[in-house]
Image (cartoon, rainbow, N blue to C red):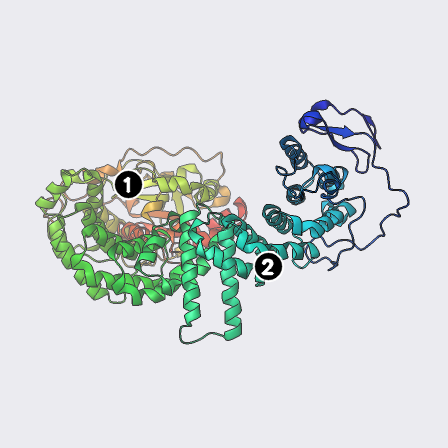
Amino acid sequence: MLRGSGGWRFLSQAIVAGMHAPRPYGAGGGVKAAKGGRLAVEAAPPQPQQGRAPPPARPPYPGPRGARFQPHPPPMPSRWPSPCAHLNAQAGAKKKTWNFIQEKMSYDTFFTMKRLIERSRRPDEVLRWLVQNPAKISHNHYAVALHKIAQLLQVPPPDAAEASGRQVLEQQDFLSLCDAIVNDCPNFDNFSVVNCLYAAAALGLSGDCALVAALEAQCHARLAQFNQKDVSMVFSSSVKLHPGVQNALAEACLPALEKNLERERHPQTLFLLLSYYRLKRQTSAAQEGERAAPDPQRVVANRKTLRLVKHALASVSGVRDQEMALLDEMLATCAGEADNKSLEFIFGSQLFYQNRQERFIRSLAEELLKKEESLSASTMSLISKYVARHRLRETPLLDAIAKFLVRKAEHLDSKVIQKLVFPFSRMSYRPSDEDAFFRVLEGVLESKALSSPLATVNILMSLFQLGRFPGAVLHRVFSPAFISNVTNSPYALIVRRYLSLLDAALQLEHPHYRGPRLHPDLKVLMFHHALTADEVNRKYSYKGVVAEALRQLVGEENYKQDQVLPPGYNTDFLLWMDSSGRVLPIQSGGPPADDIHQLSTSFAALDAGAREATGATAGPGLQYCVSSAEYLSEERSPDSRDSSTLSSPPSDGPPPPSSGARFEFSNVSENEAGAGNSGDLQSTAFYEAGRPSDGSAPRGESPSPPSAEEKQINRLVISVNDKWHYCHNSCILVGSRAMRDRHLRLLGYAILQLPYHELEKLNGIEEVKTYLRAKLHEGPS
């Protein structure tokens, strides 16, 4: 039993196996070696020596970085005897060193003490085990104790009374521990020296305190004896202890690290080394200034950086944001030294592919025109795939890809060409030499149309998104031989979807085409359900809050969400409005339009009727009648194929006019909002009507003239454009979304754009409702 300031407490024999009960610091007792290598508790406190005065008080030992320190610490207090003292008193002249195997310290004794230290719950407990058991500790325990104290100080204490935990670094016991390490570190083995320095860095001690100086001196003297892991730990500790400063120990570690760089696997060391390279580069630039001619030393440094970056990409699976930013910055500095093999490795890395490296891409854009002739098709394909994935509209880089494509198109496979063309349509960008680009591309595509049907259709889709309709290629793609090849292939349905969309685009945007067309029996919807990308991004979209605001403003029966319109385009929200500004309930019924020609003709008649009713003189396209705002046709809007949110077929028939309610939000309540009728007009009916494969006019009767009620209906599509619908850091929407909006406008829909950069400024549903009310009155833009 032990007597403490808190009263009598019983200590079970479980402490023999490494468990202990915490006691107030300063209570007597310690750990004593018993038979069998176990530890027993000493009940008697250590007696002070007779005739010895207590050690004089002195300033606190430097703890955290920035504290005052003593360059020459005073002698170690008598209460903390040297760990070698009891060994020197033992019989025998054999030289004693602190290795628990050589010095007869049993395995159980060493690891029991180690477990007691590691299981401590407060820093003062760690110090108590060391103070009260000087004969049972070795130099290896010092490193364990320092590391455990650092770990405990980094975790918030459970008790508010212990909030000042870092004050332990100024306590006498911690200062005595530091003095003991300073005095005895020449006798430490390599393991103890390295781990004590590593623990000092974890504690955040000042880089120029006596403890750090003594340990760094020992590391510098023994550097040749260290293995790769020791050198890595010493370098990491030195960089942490001297942030933003080049130091001698780190410089001494660099040759060994660079020599065996491929053997280094610790992410912390790799990124600390990368940050040290950045520090050296900044220091050199500040001292010498920027030079016009390449500096040979800088070229060597860039090559070292490139080697380190490639090794990091190959070794590290996940990084933090600041580490990825560092990687991007250092990649940008060595873009000029990256050859074809290096670029292929970098862009082929999964870690690189998953993260957007803007600075590197910007630097590479300046270098790619110089390297274009030396790059392979596979490397260019990887670069194109990367910039398209991250929507990086870096025009110099895209021009370099276009130049490469023009020069090597005849020798490239169709599957490679589709990868090189895709970023242009994705970013809605025509290269600077677009005439040569399109001419060469169309010529090669015409000669290789049958080699890979899916690649051919993908290339043609990219051209359509850019507003290019190559007639000769269209004759090949819609020819019986090509169609037969497609229908017998394993990816027949995918190609038929694209051909159906291309056929609709031809009729809407290229009405003068008189060549072969897709047979009606082969037409299908481009999309008929929500895409996987939309489901993944749904929680990041603003569509949900807009839907709730719209429900409260106009009622559920007055709009439709996630409707699919022919030829397979999704709409976020669809509203019907009359010329007087009333929102009409969307219901089924009315004559369906059989094909693109019939649908566009009906909308043209509706447009004419709306203009006649309101006296407007606007051009093609419906006029939006709320607040008399005219719809201005813009070729800039758009929607992305990979971010459509599709669910159910549309209900697109004209409603009876008597069911409308005036567009006054204050009069609409939730009780008045009923469930909208489900549509019975399937969007696939658009493809059921016959059209000759080569004809320009539909078969069957002409559509009946619209009624007076139908003439006054305006169809409004509200498009929520989230961040991934735009090119990165740009107001330009991606190409597939732009083509969708063009086609919907040609079909007679007015489009109201809700960009994410406006929605993200709103806070709460009331602000969204106010914003949406203003947008609806303002009209499409």
Q: Amino acid at mark 2?
A: Pro
SS assignment at label 2: loop
Q: Is residue 672 above or below residue 434?
A: above
Q: Position of residue 427 (x, y in %)?
A: 33, 57
Q: Is residue 12 above or below residue 535?
A: above
**Front position in the image: 198 or 45:** 45
**Front position in the image: 460 or 96:** 96
Q: Amino acid at mark 1?
A: Phe
**Front position in the image: 51 or 722:** 51
Q: Quadrant of the C terminus?
A: bottom left
In space, the residues marked 1 and 2 are separated at their CA atoms by 55 Å
Q: Which residue is mark 1?
A: 527
Q: Position of residue 702 (x, y in %)?
A: 15, 44
User: Which disc is residue 243 wearing?
Assistant: 2
In the rendered structure, the answer to whether residue 391 lies left or right of residue 143 reads left
The image quarter in which residue 2 lies: top right
Crowd tier of the residue under label 1, counting other residues whose Cα lies within 10 Å: few below 14, some 14–19, many 20 or above: many
In the rendered structure, the answer to whether residue 454 lies left or right of residue 346 reads left
Can residue 425 be seen at all in this image of the molecule? no
SS assignment at label 1: loop
Mark 1 in CB contact with mark 2 (< 8 angstroms): no
